[in-house]
Amino acid sequence: MKIETMAVHAGEAVDPTTRASSPNLVMSATFLPRELTGFSALDEDESAGYIYARSGNPTVRQLEEKLAALEGAEDARCFASGIAATHAVIMGRLSACDHAIFPENAYSGTAEFIRNSLPRFGIRTSFVDTTDADAVAAAITPATRMLWLETPCNPTLQLADIALLADLAHARGVPDVVVDGTFASPIGTRPLALGADFVVHSLTKYISGHGDAMGGVVLGHKADLDALNLEAAVHFGGVLSPFNAWLIMRGAETLPIRMRAHHDNAMAVAKWLEAHPAVSRVFYPGLPSHPQHDLARRQMANFSGMIAFQTHQDGAEIARRMVSDLQHVHFAVSLGHLRSLIYWIGTDDILQSTYQHPPEAEARFRALTGRGIFRLSVGLEHPEDICADLARCL
């Protein structure tokens, strides 16, 4: 099937009893097994069917099968949020004394979890500029068990060369290369086909697409995900609500069409911003001015709807105007919504609260972001209306 057809049909089937065309929403917490099975989840047998919603639910399973098809994965496991999925794969694959490499600039929820929580469990970490393959190679040790990539990176839109870094890591004995593909979605990049072992998405973002449901997913090999499901879902308990799964499945059905519109709108808005006298710099992988545009063209089939930009004037002052004056673009966190969302990220603030970089990494971040950047998630409104709304504040 082509990806548009997979988005609609994968994981779904006509209900044999009601003949319902749309997926069922199954809210039951417990199920009657088809045969006698153990009381503990450790003793459950797949042939017995669903037992208890923490270990599996029919609606959630439909979503997992759809996402696995879209990503080209053997299987998928859904969780209650993107950070729950991140927690699942990190804590499910790493143990005390293991070493893991993470991007020096990554999503704040991931960065804060890694810096503030992992050390308490004896997991050692290094933070590296993952745009630099030599820096990644230099950070690998005999104890390195995971290389975590985020591409495009939140919020700086830096890219990581997945194929190059996966080959490098595997050649040096690193078993797990994990890619957070939230910014790109499965329509933009398919990391497993480029050599990654796991892919993580915040389903709250593009895959849901409507800003009304939280969720996360880990995709990869079935055997690995079965083990993660036992530990991360059954024992950690961060399971996805069936209602949220049903909402996200509805969003996933239109993902290919929406991503084309996000891409087209973002390209138009990025070009407009680049020409605006108030704007000093624009970061968008689809623009030739992006320092990794050639990599973006090789690695991404869709440049997505995420833009970052800087202004000549103090960004915090412009942000204050945005809070009160924007009419169509919402001044709000999150991304991947059908509505355009923008937020101001001050460099001093994020360096102090999230990144806590050593001097060399801090200098690289300041050279990239200046006093701060606006992160813009371009929605499905007409691009002329988006630009007119931003012009009111710029």
Image: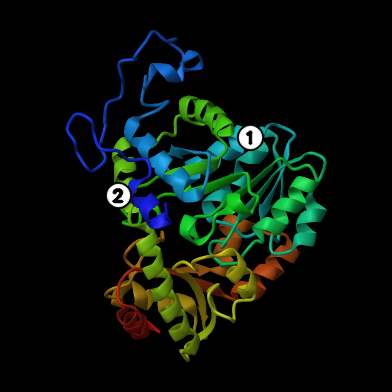
- Return the residue nearer the eye: 59 or 282: 59
Which of discs 1 and 2 lies nearer the camera? The answer is 2
Q: Residue at x 36, y 53 (%)?
A: 5
Which scheme is used to colour this image of the protein? Answer: rainbow
Q: Amino acid at mark 2?
A: Arg
Any part of residue 80 in sight: no
Provide residue 48's location: percent of width, then percent of height.
39, 16
Residue 16 versus residue 5 in the image, above or below? above
Any part of residue 310 in sight: yes
Q: Which residue is mark 2?
A: 250
- The furthest residue to the bottom: 277
Q: Quadrant of the C terminus?
A: bottom left
- The furthest residue to the front: 1
Horizontal side of 349 relative to 50 (left or right) equals right
- The furthest residue to the top: 36
Nearer-N-terminus badge (1/2): 1
Horizontal side of 170 relative to 274 (left or right) equals right
Q: Which residue is mark 1?
A: 93
Q: Amino acid at mark 1?
A: Arg
Disc 1 crowd rating (10 Å Cα; few below 14, some 14-19, many 20+) is some
Residue 347 versus residue 172 in the image, above or below? below
- The furthest residue to the left: 18
